[in-house]
Image (tube, rainbow, N blue to C red):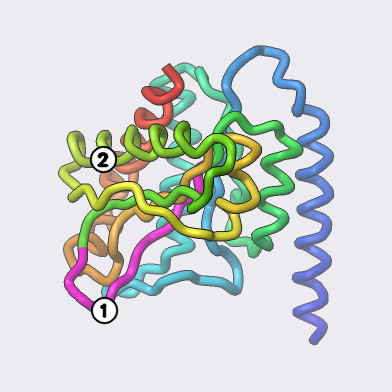
Amino acid sequence: MKTDLKMKLKNVVFLLVMLKMCFLFGQNLDGRKRIVIDVGHGGKDSGVIGINGIQEKDVVLNVAKEIIRLNKTILDDRMDIYLTRYSDTFIALSDRSRLAKALKADVFVSLHCNASPTYSKGIEVYVHNSEKLNIRQSIALGLSVINESNSKLGFEKRGVKFADFQVLREMTNFCPTILVELGFVTNKDEADYFLKPENIRAMALAILVGIFNYLK
């Protein structure tokens, strides 16, 4: 019970600090496009556990951190990128969208890994299943990320699909918003792919370039 209370207090403190940072940097005075990468799951929520034991929460955090690094080293910080979590921390879904809105995000990309009881593979993107604002832009963003992952990494294209996931529902009216399923960790080949740092780097670069190409 005491451990649960400590975790809740830690999360509250984290959220307050992040919101303070959001208000400080929310104006984006340098004119760069602001990208919020929503790092799925975290903390007590492991997400999907892969066929080789890898956890979804770790895969997406590793990819997200690499996106930050590559934006600095390859794109010379051309985009202003923030993560919804930087460590193995549980952040509620509603708090993720609150952070992105406080940061005045131009684009919101939620990262996840897929799972299936059958032999499924490939990368797919979800946008909100409505006629809300930014739907066309969200589809275009999703296609850009999928095409980059397919042409550069060889991941099978599973297309842009529609869903009513909470982060999509809460963010789509605010800015172009997608949820990316990076691959199936229930597929041995794709699960093993994410064990290698160079492959994490390659996936991060594909997503980064996909976002950059969309913004161009």
Which x, y percent locates residue 95?
A: 72, 55
| Location of residue 113 by image quarter | bottom left
Tell me the amino acid under the disc marked 1.
Answer: Pro
Structural distance between the alpha carbons of marks 1 and 2: 23 Å
Q: Residue at x 31, y 43 (%)?
A: 203
- Label 2 crowd bin: few (<14), some (14–19), many (20+), radius 10 Å: many
Instruction: For mark 1, give the secondary structure.
Output: loop
Is 116 included in the stretch rendered in magenta? yes
Q: Is residue 90 left or right of residue 39?
A: right
Disc 2, SS: helix
> Which residue reaches farthest bottom?
1
Q: Quadrant of the N terminus?
A: bottom right
Relative side of 32 to 181, left or right: right
Q: Is residue 70 above or below residue 180?
A: above
Choose between 167 and 135: the one closer to the eye. 135
Q: At 47% from the left edge and 32% from the top edge, which residue is drawn?
A: 137
Report if residue 170 lies within the magenta region. Answer: no
Identity, as a three-letter code, of the amino acid under mark 2: Ser
* Residues shaded magenta: 109-120
Which of these two is toward me, 136 or 206?
136
Give the left or right position of residue 210, taking residue 40 as reference.
left
* Labels 1 and 2: the sequence-earlier one: 1
**In the rendering, which numbered label is found on residue 117?**
1
Q: Nearer the viewer, residue 47 or 87?
A: 47
Task: Please determine whether, in this image, residue 149 is positioned above or below residue 14.
Answer: above
Q: Residue at x 49, y 39 (%)?
A: 135
The quadrant where residue 7 appears: bottom right
Q: Which residue is mark 2?
A: 149
> Foreground: 80 or 192?
80
